[in-house]
């Protein structure tokens, strides 16, 4: 659901629910969740508040649904690298790192939607916070499974290091504290995998 230059003509063709979600994403990313009201979303989507509440009981549920869509895009990245590199868990891990690295330019302009949302939603009972936490749990489990299948001697530790790196790269890109973050991210992930790889069997 990334906005494009042809947004007005494209959005006009969307069904009402998708048009609302598209407008909400555009506003939440550019202005933040708290600053954006339902009326602003209705105007952006060229609809009414009443129409929004027909599809989403509350604004909180609209926020949660937007983040479900974002989370699904990340989970789809796992599926893609699995299909592209079957039975090659190391390449799948590197593929995930490339997916994050390729997305860093957008993060530099708009920030990570999960990081931004957590900062705005301190209540862990909020439905959108629960979406983020469930997503992060699934992501951690899938990365741990890849590290285990790669035969790394301490898959839990390696998965934790890579998670810290992927998350940190997005934060560092957002605040501009590191130059060439995508390039550095890929190099460091590869170094972690090389260091953690099981030793080669001795030659005779």
Image: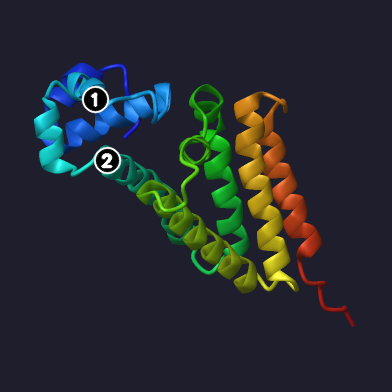
N-terminal of the pair, mark 1 or mark 2, is 1
For marks 1 and 2, give the CA distance: 10 Å
Dot 1 alpha-carbon crowd within 10 angstroms: few under 14, some 14 to 19, many 20 or more = many
Q: Quadrant of residue 14?
A: top left
Horizontal side of 6 relative to 173 (left or right) equals: left
Report helix, strand or loop for mark 2. helix
Crowding at dot 2, Cα within 10 Å, few <14 / some 14-19 / many 20+, comes out as many
Tell which of 84 and 77 is nearer to you.
77
Secondary structure at badge 1 equals: helix
From this viewpoint, is residue 15 visible?
no
Residue at image coords 39%, 29%: 34
Please tell me which residue lies in front, 192 or 15: 15
Give residue 183's mark. Answer: none
Q: Position of residue 179 (x, y in %)?
A: 72, 25
| Vertical placement of residue 145 versus 34, above or below | below
Disc 2 designates what residue? 62
Image color mode: rainbow
Mark 1 and mark 2 in contact? Answer it, CB < 8 Å: yes
Give the percent coordinates (x, y) of residue 125.
42, 53
Q: Is residue 114 left or right of residue 19?
A: right
User: Label 1, on which residue?
Assistant: 41
- x 14%, y 28%: residue: 49
* Screen quadrant of the N terminus: top left
Measured as percent of width and height from the top left, residue 131 is found at 40, 52
Q: From the viewer's perspective, is 7 left or right of 99?
A: left
Residue 5's quadrant in the figure? Answer: top left
Q: Residue at x 63, y 61 (%)?
A: 90
Q: Is residue 109 left or right of residue 55?
A: right
- Name the residue at 27% across, 45% down: 61
């Amino acid at each position: 659901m990334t906005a494009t230059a042809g947004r007005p003509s494209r959005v006009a063709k969307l069904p009402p629910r998708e048009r609302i979600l598209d407008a909400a994403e555009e506003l939440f990313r550019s202005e933040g969740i708290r600053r954006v009201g339902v009326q602003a979303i209705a105007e952006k989507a060229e609809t009414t508040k009443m129409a929004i509440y027909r599809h989403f009981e509350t604004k909180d549920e609209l926020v949660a649904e937007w983040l479900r869509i974002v989370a699904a895009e990340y989970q789809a990245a796992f599926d893609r690298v699995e299909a592209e590199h079957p039975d090659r868990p190391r390449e799948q891990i590197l593929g995930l790192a490339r997916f994050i690295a390729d997305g860093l330019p957008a993060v530099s302009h708009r920030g990570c939607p999960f990081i931004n949302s957590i900062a705005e939603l301190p209540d862990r009972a909020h439905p959108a916070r629960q979406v983020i936490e469930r997503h992060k749990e699934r992501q951690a489990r899938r990365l741990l499974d890849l590290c285990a299948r790669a035969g790394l001697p301490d898959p839990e530790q390696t998965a934790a290091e890579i998670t810290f790196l992927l998350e940190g790269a997005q934060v560092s890109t957002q605040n501009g504290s590191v130059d060439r973050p995508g390039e550095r991210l890929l190099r460091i992930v590869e170094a972690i995998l090389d260091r953690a790889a099981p030793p080669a069997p001795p030659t005779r």
